[in-house]
């Protein structure tokens, strides 16, 4: 197993209290697979991704759990070896390419500084060749490599970000809403690119998104998150065939309405809970049509329903 | 717009700005109570003699004629003759200027070094006691009057500990003379440079010793602003997405701190440097007076006391041109450092 996240809990210790952004979360990721993490905004998806990278920002802190990468617990590692894993063995693609590149560095410098720090033995020429090959594959012409981030469109910048995530052939790539901030046409292009890179580079990918359509299109397995908790874990096909958790059912039925601000809004009535004071029991119970007494005061537990399917819901025992 | 045409446009803007400055100063020195002639010769001077002096100084014609005469002189690059000793004002300014430049450079250096080291450190230790310490330093150093700080410095290091000279630019009779290069005599008036040119290390150390207290005084007084700006910009930059992304690429903390953090945070710091330059000159006047530093500040102070209209006007115009020039240089530098800016 390439990555095993076990009972991971992450909280932001804010002035107003502890926000449990991720609670008792577990997932396993096999080499070569694409796993989706889906959930509404604020459900803790990005925090989870940052935790795997080891860069949860303060006041966030990993409270408990394990993150085993190639069998080694990242949470027990020293700072320096962990830094050497980042970008080289696990890398991340971010949501907003417009703000994710250093404005005072050109594209080539972004790549060369990364090669220099992680693979100091690679000669300058070889490094440049590798960058050139990758840029070509990404559809960025060589002449543009000395251009600065502001000279590129959002889609092109995201291609650069993808390139930076792939240049060192990492074992695991985490893509956090990689197309959310792009317009529809560019989004489709970037998705195609990701799909083809997945094949050519045999990527192991964690795809974080609130977009159910992307999950269906891209992933082998999916974990559904709500208020920091895993609600359901399932092969993608089976999930869409027959969602088990009431929250998953609601999520899949929801037709996203695009508001003026461009934010997707699901029809699920009510709001996700305030993580500073989440409801006791199942966090979904105030919005769940099937909620019964137990849901209001008994914490969720995982039930293995069938082979490869886990669900957290009191309806299943 | 190319950088060149931007500079031309900026220079064109400088002209009306200077004209306003010149006019305001012209009016102010004439509204100030006090008569330069009486001040100069005392009350004993006969009315006839006073008239003669006024005539010689061009003060017997109506104000608007004085004003137009003054402007036409200015356009021809003439700052006029000093009332108090009949020397050309421009010569006086140029002989006082190097002292001020030297003090300014070293003070700026002190301010920037303190500002950046404290500011970066505070941002790294955000929210800690150390951070609070740096923030307190920034406020105190900003609030403390320059001359008061200067007096404390003198009292401590010169009078108390006897390790540094209290006043002046060099020890008596020890003025560095520069050197001849290929038949040309080079003398900058910056004593730390002239002494090195002459290869006289003792003179250099002497000049440096004299520089320490005044430039620390002025530098510390200015550093508060730099600490604050560096700290707040670093905090802002270090929270940006591209810093998170850089961390995710496994870059070293130093790289992130300097070539991602500081490199971006410095751009606004640079702007402040330009803006602070006027404050720096203001501070230089007070510092120079405290440390008997024979520069433009002392000169301006003296000419104001002497009601020396032409000299006051000349000094202020010179300060104005200097500030305009520095802000232009800073802008050009900004454009050079920030690839996003194209004029
Ligand atoms: N920097 C932060 N400081 C405090 N709380 C945070 C911070 N970042 C995230 N959170 C909390 O963690 C929750 C999960 O956030 P996030 O992981 O970004 O969710 P998602 O990516 O699913 O939208 C948010 O609802 C918020 O309450
Ligand atoms: S545990 Fe209860 S409230 Fe939660 S999803 Fe299941 S039925 Fe609904
Ligand atoms: Mg997110």
Image (cartoon, helix red, strand yellow):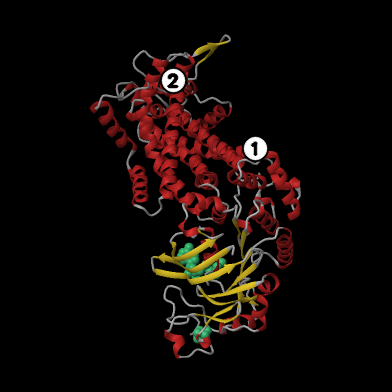
- For residue B8, the mark is 1
Distance in Å between CA atoms under marks 1 and 2: 34 Å
Q: Residues within 10 Å of mark 1 (few under 14, many from 20)?
A: few
Give the answer, above or below, for where B186 lies relative to B238: above
Is any atom of residue B13 visible in this view? no
Q: Residues within 10 Å of mark 2 (few under 14, many from 20)?
A: many
* Helix, strand or loop for disc 2: helix
Which one is earlier in the sequence, the residue at label 1 or at label 2? 1
Give the answer, above or below, for where A111 lies relative to B289: below
Image location (x, y in percent) of residue A43: 53, 72
Marks 1 and 2 close (CB-CB < 8 Å): no
Q: What is the quadrant of residue A162 in the picture?
A: bottom right
- Image quadrant where one finds the C terminus of chain B: top right
Q: Residue at x 42, y 34 (%)?
A: B110
Q: Is residue B189 left or right of residue A218?
A: left
Residue nearest the viewer, comparing A295 with A266: A295
Give the answer, above or below, for where B209 lies relative to B68: above
Residue nearest the viewer, comparing B21 with B192: B192
- For residue B191, the mark is 2
- Image quadrant where one finds the N terminus of chain B: top right
Residue nearest the viewer, comparing A93 with B299: A93
- For residue A129, the mark is none
Chain of the residue under the numbered disc 1 shown in the image: B
Q: Is residue B146 left or right of residue B103?
A: left
Q: Is residue B11 left or right of residue B145?
A: right
Image location (x, y in percent) of residue B44: 29, 21
Is any atom of residue A238 visible in this view? yes
Q: What is the quadrant of residue B175 in the picture?
A: top left
């Amino acid at each position: 197993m390439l990555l095993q996240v076990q009972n991971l809990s992450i909280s932001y210790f804010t002035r107003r209290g502890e926000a449990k952004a991720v609670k008792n979360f577990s997932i396993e990721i096999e080499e070569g697979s694409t796993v989706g993490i889906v959930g509404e905004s604020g459900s803790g998806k990005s925090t989870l991704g940052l935790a795997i990278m080891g860069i949860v920002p303060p006041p966030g802190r990993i409270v408990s759990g394990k993150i085993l990468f190639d069998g080694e617990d990242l949470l027990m590692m020293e700072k320096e070896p962990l830094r050497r894993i980042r970008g080289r063995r696990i890398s991340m693609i971010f949501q907003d390419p417009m703000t994710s590149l250093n404005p005072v560095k050109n594209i080539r410098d972004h790549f060369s500084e990364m090669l220099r720090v992680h693979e100091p033995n690679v000669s300058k020429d070889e490094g440049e060749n590798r960058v050139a090959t990758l840029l070509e594959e990404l559809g960025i012409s060589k002449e543009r490599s000395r251009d600065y981030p502001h000279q590129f469109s959002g889609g092109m910048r995201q291609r650069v970000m993808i390139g930076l995530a792939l240049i060192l052939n990492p074992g695991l790539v985490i893509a956090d809403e990689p197309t959310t901030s792009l317009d529809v046409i560019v989004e489709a292009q970037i998705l195609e690119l990701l799909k083809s890179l997945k094949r050519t580079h045999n990527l192991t990918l964690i795809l974080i998104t609130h977009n159910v359509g992307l999950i269906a299109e891209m992933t082998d397995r999916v974990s559904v998150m709500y208020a920091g908790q895993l609600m359901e874990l399932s092969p993608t096909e089976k999930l869409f065939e027959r969602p088990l958790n009431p929250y998953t059912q609601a999520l899949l039925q929801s037709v996203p309405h695009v508001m003026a601000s461009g934010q997707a809004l699901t029809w699920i009535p009510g709001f996700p809970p305030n993580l500073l004071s989440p409801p006791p029991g199942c966090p979904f119970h105030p919005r769940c049509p099937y909620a019964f007494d137990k849901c209001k005061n008994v914490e969720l537990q995982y039930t293995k329903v069938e082979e490869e399917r886990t669900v957290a819901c009191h309806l299943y025992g | 717009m190319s950088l060149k045409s931007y500079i031309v446009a900026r220079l064109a803007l400088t002209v009306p700005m200077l004209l306003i400055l010149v006019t305001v100063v012209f009016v102010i020195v004439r509204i100030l109570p006090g008569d330069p002639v009486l001040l100069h010769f005392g009350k004993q001077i006969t009315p006839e003699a006073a008239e003669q002096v006024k005539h010689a100084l061009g003060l017997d014609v109506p104000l608007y004629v004085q004003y137009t005469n003054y402007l036409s002189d200015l356009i021809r690059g003439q700052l006029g003759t000093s009332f108090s000793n009949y020397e050309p004002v421009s010569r006086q300014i140029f002989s006082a200027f190097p002292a001020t430049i030297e003090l300014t450079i070293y003070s700026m250096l002190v301010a920037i070094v303190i500002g950046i080291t404290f500011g970066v450190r505070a941002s790294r230790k955000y929210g800690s006691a150390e951070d609070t310490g740096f923030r307190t330093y920034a406020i105190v150093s900003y609030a403390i009057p320059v001359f008061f700080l200067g007096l404390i410095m003198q009292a401590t290091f010169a009078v108390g500990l006897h390790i540094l000279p209290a006043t002046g630019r060099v020890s008596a009779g020890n003025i560095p003379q520069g050197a001849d290069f290929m038949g040309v005599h080079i003398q900058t008036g910056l004593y730390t440079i002239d002494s090195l040119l002459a290869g006289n290390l003792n003179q250099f150390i002497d000049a440096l010793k004299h520089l320490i207290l005044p430039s620390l005084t002025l530098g510390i007084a200015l550093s508060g602003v730099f600490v604050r700006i560096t700290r707040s910009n670093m905090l802002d930059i270090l929270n940006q997405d591209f810093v998170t992304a850089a961390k995710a690429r496994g870059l070293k903390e130093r790289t992130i701190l300097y070539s991602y953090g500081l490199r971006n945070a410095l751009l606004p710091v640079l702007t402040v440097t330009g803006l602070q330059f006027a404050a720096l000159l203001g501070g230089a006047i007070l510092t120079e007076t405290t440390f008997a530093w024979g520069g433009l500040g002392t000169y301006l102070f003296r000419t104001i006391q002497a009601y020396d209209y032409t000299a006051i006007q000349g000094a202020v115009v010179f300060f104005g041109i200097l500030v305009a020039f520095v802000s232009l240089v800073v802008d050009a530098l900004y454009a050079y450092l920030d690839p996003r800016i194209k004029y």
